[in-house]
Image: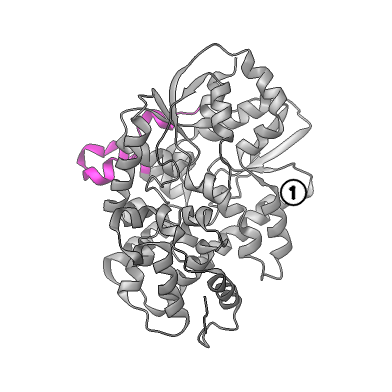
Amino acid sequence: MDTRLAGFIRDTPAGKEAEAILRSCVHCGFCTATCPTYQLLGDELDGPRGRIYLIKQMLEGQPVTEKTRLHLDRCLTCRSCETTCPSGVKYSHLLDIGRQVVEDKLPRKGGDALTRRMLRATLPRPAVFGPAVKLGQLLRPLLPSGLAEKLPPESQGEAKPWPRAAGHRRRMLTLAGCVQPALAPNINAATARVLDRLGIELFEENRAGCCGAVRFHLNDQDAARNDMRRNIDAWWPHVAAGIEAIVVTASGCGVQVRDYGRVLADDPVYAEKAARISALCRDPAEILGAERESLQTLLAAAPGARGKLAFHSPCTLQHGLKIRGVIEEWLAAAGYTLVAVADGHLCCGSAGAYTLLQPELSRRLRDNKLTALMAGSPLVIATANIGCLTHLQAGSVLPVRHWMELVDVALP
């Protein structure tokens, strides 16, 4: 795609990255076939190709309008289009640049600005978010239905204990995260119990916090970079001590941590450390894959069939981390019968704060996803990301669990 960027961005790192991405696009339109919002709305500007044109126009100096903002806001950043694109266009990186330009040139006003400020101030802070969730659960009958359904059941906040320190020589660090400790605290504990059976000690570093994804995708990218730097500082002594990996149980956070090296590439103080952190980042599926023989031996001793299960593969898992088909194998090995799920590449509508900012589209996508997941009459739904888990659970009569919890339960 031929492009001539305007002077305000042409010679900046963001401008150079944007120009390279724009030039890689060949207008083929394959991306529209797998775009969830295009499938729902049928508007070219609500598909990747249309949004690329809108961003191109902005970067070439054309006025930034509310219409441009609307179509960029509607994007889920699910990256399904990147999986489909034959030219390898890094659409999500271009979208980040485009959204920041809109934010700078057309500041938000009124309720929209206030809502986003509140989300940026609340979601990344466990000390604030956790008590807010508990208060919301107590006041659930008094809350609007749209907000009440987003709160997890009280039982979901119960966690089994972490394993006792066994003196394992192999040690791995894990990200506690910001919303996961309040919404589903058993996920990291279950992962620690599974890895303990494999001779690996998993531990958290309390000085680390939000991975940066919340603020980054709410277009406060400077604050997000500070979140990343704080985590790097907290983790670095453990990296220097020789930990094997940083295990991130939420695939959405995993995508962000694996991107630290790119996002901080121009930071003279943190660039090298950020690249090292990204290289150490692992999804639990990758850890178990490296321990295949040992885990298969353990699961072989597990009780028999556990019934039907539908697996929802988060966009961040299959399109971001590019992990496909691996978790399904482990769930089958754990005794579950996996049912077929139509249109598994499409987003469930969670997408971080999207459920709060685009509630109608988010709900429609969730309804479509739940219809596909329940078509095979499963007894339980499994997923790999806390956002997808809570979003699906809000509309599901079936339990929705993180897949590592199910592997943990299956181990004898």
In this rendering, the answer to whether 18 lies above or below 277 is below
- As rendered, which of 233 and 74 lies closer to the eye? 74
Q: Which residue is mark 1?
A: 239
Mark 1, other Cα within 10 Å: few <14 / some 14–19 / many ≥20: some
* Residue 150 visible in the shown view: no
Quadrant position of residue 295: top right
Please provide percent x and percent y for residue 50.
39, 68
Q: Which residues are magenta?
A: 133-161
Please provide percent x and percent y for residue 96.
49, 66
Please provide percent x and percent y for residue 158.
45, 28
Q: What's the residue at 72%, 55% (across, down)? A: 276
Quadrant position of residue 143: top left
Please provide percent x and percent y for residue 399.
38, 28
- Counting the numbered discs, the total is 1
Helix, strand or loop under label 1: helix
Q: What's the residue at 70%, 39% (across, down)? A: 172
Q: Is residue 275 left or right of residue 209?
A: right
In this rendering, the answer to whether 6 lies above or below 20 is below
Q: What's the residue at 61%, 37% (across, down)? A: 284
- Quarter of the picture containing the C terminus is top right
Q: Is residue 340 left or right of residue 39?
A: right
Question: Is residue 93 inside the magenta stretch?
Answer: no
Q: Kindly identify the amino acid type of the residue bearing the numbered disc 1.
A: Val
In this rendering, the answer to whether 3 lies above or below 192 is below
